[in-house]
């Protein structure tokens, strides 16, 4: 790993991952230009794609203000990840998949998370990194044409803790 | 460089019309790149040297014009589509390529005009 790669990896670990801990990230040099580092991020809900791109661009601008290198955000939404990069779906746990839907609790609406979590608490196990695999509630199915319902304005930690408490109750 | 850019743009838009989104994204990206390169070459004395070319093109977009920040982001989106088209398992969608067409042409037009000044 050269010095530039190390700086980028460190920035992704220290800045990006704390904000988006559940989105798998893959760094690779562009095949056409070694000064471009492709930052592929997987399993991002459609309504957060732009936000993730903006964050990566900001990190790139901070790291390389002279513009001699660049980070190229390549964000794969949930559906694309599910279809083309299943190995990058977080918390994929064969045996617990009912309907091939991946629900990230941190983007999951609080009320639905709690009620749905209570309904499922006897049925499903929670993987250690806070996401679980299950079929979505019918309300989520109908609202977003098959995409799980989510909201980006809730505090991720609060949502995780709420769901954990609900499951422990 | 103008005629090459026009040729790529023409092929790219026809590929998009026929649903060939990978070829479309690739050709449209290079059509824009060639306009930016024309400017960088004429106004800044930059010549293609392989390493750093795409970063230099993005940097040039970012540093010129009133809409430089927006154009830089859209140029990055186009670079993403083109990289996806050439190397990734998934392909740019018709919607993604159609969505970027207007901005891509605006960037192209802007840099050709600037190169002529």
Image: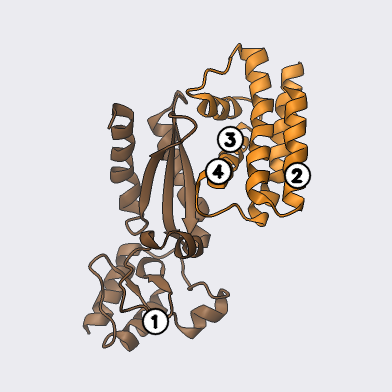
Q: Are marks 4 and 1 on the same chain?
A: no
Q: Mark 1 belongs to which subunit?
A: A
Question: In this rendering, which labeled residue sits more in front, label 2 or label 3?
Answer: 2
Secondary structure under the numbered disc 2 in the rendered image: helix
- Chain bearing tag 3 is B
> What colour has chain A?
brown
Secondary element type, mark 1: loop
State which mark lies toward you, 3 or 1: 1
Among the chains pictured, the one given orange colouring is B
Q: Is residue A30 left or right of residue A23?
A: right
In the picture as drawn, the residue positioned furthest to the top comes out as B45
Which is in the foreground here, disc 4 or disc 2? 4
Which quadrant would the N terminus of chain A be assigned to in this image? top left
Disc 4 crowd rating (10 Å Cα; few below 14, some 14-19, many 20+) is some
Query: Is circle 4 on the same chain as circle 2?
Result: yes
Crowd tier of the residue under label 2, counting other residues whose Cα lies within 10 Å: few below 14, some 14–19, many 20 or above: many
From the viewer's perspective, is B89 left or right of B102?
left
Q: CA distance from mark 4 to mark 3?
A: 21 Å
> x%, y% of residue A65?
43, 27
Please give the residue where the numbered disc 1 appears in the rendered image. A98
Mark 4 or mark 3, earlier in chain? 3
From this view, report whether residue B1 is shown above or below residue A144: above
At which x and y percent is residue A48?
A: 49, 58
Q: Which residue is mark 2?
A: B13
Chain ID at mark 4: B
- Mark 4 vs mark 2, CA separation in Å: 17 Å
Measure the C-alpha gap from mark 1 to mark 2: 42 Å
């Amino acid at each position: 790993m050269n010095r530039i790669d190390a700086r980028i990896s460190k920035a992704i670990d220290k800045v990006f991952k704390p904000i988006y801990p559940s989105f798998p990230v893959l760094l690779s040099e562009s095949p056409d230009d070694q000064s471009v580092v492709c930052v592929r991020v997987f399993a991002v809900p459609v309504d957060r794609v732009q936000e993730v791109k903006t964050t990566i661009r900001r990190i790139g601008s901070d790291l390389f203000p002279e513009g001699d290198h660049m980070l190229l955000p390549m964000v794969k939404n949930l559906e694309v990840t599910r279809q083309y990069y299943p190995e990058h779906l977080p918390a994929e746990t064969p045996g617990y998949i009912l309907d091939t839907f991946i629900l990230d609790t941190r983007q999951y609406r609080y009320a639905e998370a709690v009620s749905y979590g209570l309904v499922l608490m006897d049925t499903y196990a929670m993987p250690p990194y806070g996401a679980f695999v299950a079929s979505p509630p019918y309300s989520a199915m109908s609202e977003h044409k098959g995409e799980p319902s989510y909201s980006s304005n809730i505090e991720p930690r609060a949502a995780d803790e709420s769901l954990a408490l609900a499951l422990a109750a | 460089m103008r005629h090459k850019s026009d040729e790529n743009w023409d092929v790219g838009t026809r590929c998009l019309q026929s649903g060939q989104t990978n070829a479309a994204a690739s050709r449209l990206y290079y059509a824009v790149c060639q306009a930016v390169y024309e400017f960088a070459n004429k106004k800044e004395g930059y010549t293609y040297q392989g390493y750093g070319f795409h970063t230099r093109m993005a940097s040039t977009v970012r540093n010129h014009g009133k809409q430089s920040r927006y154009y830089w982001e859209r140029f990055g989106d186009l670079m993403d589509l083109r990289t996806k088209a050439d190397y990734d398992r998934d392909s740019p969608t018709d919607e993604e390529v159609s969505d970027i067409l207007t901005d891509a042409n605006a960037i192209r037009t802007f840099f050709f005009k600037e190169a002529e000044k």
